[in-house]
Image (cartoon, helix red, strand yellow):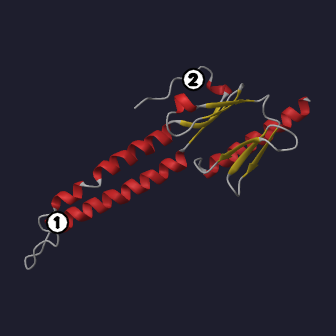
Amino acid sequence: MAIPKKIQSPEKEMRFTRAAQGRLFLVVAAVMIAISFGLWVLATQGTEFEAPRLEGYACTALLPWPVIFLLLRLAVRCIRHAYLIFTPLGIEIFPLFRPEKHMTLITWQEIFLVDVDLPTQRMLLHHNAEKTSGIVLSLRPILPAQQRLLAHAMQTLMQKRAAAC
């Protein structure tokens, strides 16, 4: 698995990962591990009076493991890799799959106004004053504490931009 590269100037950027999504994948993987363990117990453990309920089907406990492996890899990827990066150049948006190919950079000059709506967990990047064009980003992959940090950062940045004009 590719690892994130070292950052030249980490003090100049803010990274937001898909940690909330990764947490969900970890929970689903843990539930599937419990199901696999339950199948194994039912297939191998019995009492002195009764044979195991799934006797002869112990191999069914191995069926969830490929899915568990994929969920764990996906969870680690979500937790380690960035979803949004705020840099001095602009906002970099990374999709979940093939981020090196489909990464989007929106420069600060392209952004006229930013609305962060925490109840609906959306961030709107408007390109004009009429708010007729722009980009809508979901904040659901980001942890709630990081969503508040992102909202504060964007509010502060927009205030600085308004003061400079």
Q: Position of residue 23 (x, y in %)?
A: 48, 51
Task: Indicate which disc residue 43 carries.
Answer: 1
- Mark 2, Cα crowd under 10 Å, few <14 / some 14-19 / many 20+, is few
The residue depicted at 80 percent of the width and 39 percent of the height is 156
Location of the C terminus by quadrant is: top right
Label 2 secondary element: loop
Name, please, the residue furthest toward the bottom.
49
* Residue visible at 82% across and 44% down in the picture: 132
Q: Please name the amino acid that badge 2 sits on.
A: Ile
Depth check, mark 2 against mark 1: the one in front is 1
Element under disc 1 = helix
Please identify the quadrant where the N terminus is shown. top left
Kindly identify which residue carries mark 2. 7
Amino acid type assigned to the residue bearing label 1 in the image: Ala
The outermost residue toward the front is: 132
On screen, 11 above or below 48?
Answer: above
> Relative to residue 149, is residue 53 drawn left or right?
left
Q: Nearer the viewer, residue 149 or 4?
A: 4
Position of residue 69 measured from the top left corner of the image (x, y, whole percent): 33, 46
Q: Quadrant of residue 18?
A: top right
In percent of the image, x 74 and y 45: which residue is there? 124
**Of 13 and 137, which appears nearest the observer?**
137
The x, y position of residue 98, in whole percent, is 50, 33
